[in-house]
Amino acid sequence: MATMASLASSCSAFLECDALRVRGSSAEGAVRRGSGVVRCAVAKGDGEVSRRQVACALLAGALVMPVAPMARALLEVDDDDSLLEKVKEDKRKRIQKRSTAINEFVKESGVVQVAVYKLSEAGQAIDGGDLTKATSVLAQQNADWILDVQAALSKVSSNSDEKAVADNFRSALSSLQAAVKSGDSNSSRTAFVASAEALDKWARLTGLSEKVVGL
């Protein structure tokens, strides 16, 4: 681009110098030959300048014409860069979303693991006839592990089957809590089996069973 500007400037300077030369030559001829000849000289000089102007214009046009494809190429490069940046940003968002999902999955699997430990502890107490101990584990409605597993059931369940099994576990757990609190050994065993089976099925449906030990 700098080269083309220099050529255009040189062409303009050349035209100005040539026009001055023609005017000077015409004026000198007027002194020697008279006014009639001067008009012819000026007319001839004007014709020469016009031809040079046309030549320079054609040269400038020839130099400028390749600029259009170059400009289009530059725009295409810019478009490619923008598209590449968009692809990179989309990939970064997908990776971040997947990482968040994995972290949440690990967190919820940890909650379910605690619930499995608590149910196992209660089951051993029931099997040993120690309903008092089972009650201390299960009968606290606001115990942290119970609140956490209830929240995990709601958060992880994403379809009707998973939600239905989650409801079955909630119902079985409530029955188990009531049974051990009342001291009914048979009902406690039945409710415990129902709770364990429901939690195991739900964990399998949601994929958490791969991260949970003891089911």
Image (cartoon, grey):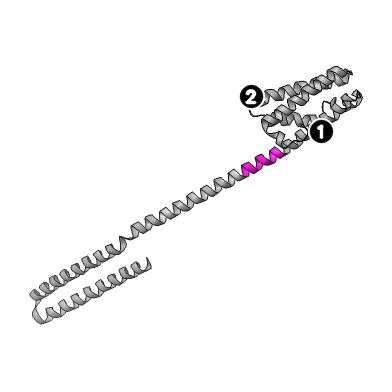
Looking at the figure, which quarter contains the N terminus?
bottom left
Mark 2 secondary-structure assignment: helix
Q: Residue at x 35, y 69 (%)?
A: 3
Mark 1 secondary-structure assignment: helix
Question: Residue 70: x and y, percent?
Answer: 37, 59
Any part of residue 193 in sight: yes
Question: Residue 6: x and y, percent?
Answer: 34, 70
Q: Residue at x 31, y 68 (%)?
A: 8
Looking at the figure, which quarter contains the C terminus?
top right
Does the magenta segment cover residue 98?
yes
For label 1, the crowd category at 10 Å Cα-Cα, with few meaning under 14, some 14 to 19 and many 20 or more, is some
133 on left or right of 1 = right
Magenta highlight: main SS = helix
Question: Residue 135: x and y, percent?
Answer: 88, 25
Q: Give, as a single range, the part of the protein colored magenta.
A: 96-106
Res 60 → quadrant? bottom left
The amino acid type found where label 1 is placed reads Tyr
Q: Is residue 58 above or below residue 193?
A: below
Q: Tell me the mark number nearer the camera, choosing from 1 and 2.
A: 1
Q: Which mark is residue 38?
A: none
Q: Residue at x 30, y 72 (%)?
A: 10
The amino acid type found where label 2 is placed reads Ser
Q: Which mark is residue 117?
A: 1
Res 201 → quadrant? top right
Q: Earlier in the sequence, mark 1 or mark 2?
A: 1
CA gap, disc 1 to disc 2?
Answer: 27 Å
Front in this rendered view, residue 1 or 46: 1
Q: Which mark is residue 160?
A: 2
Front in this rendered view, residue 116 or 82: 116
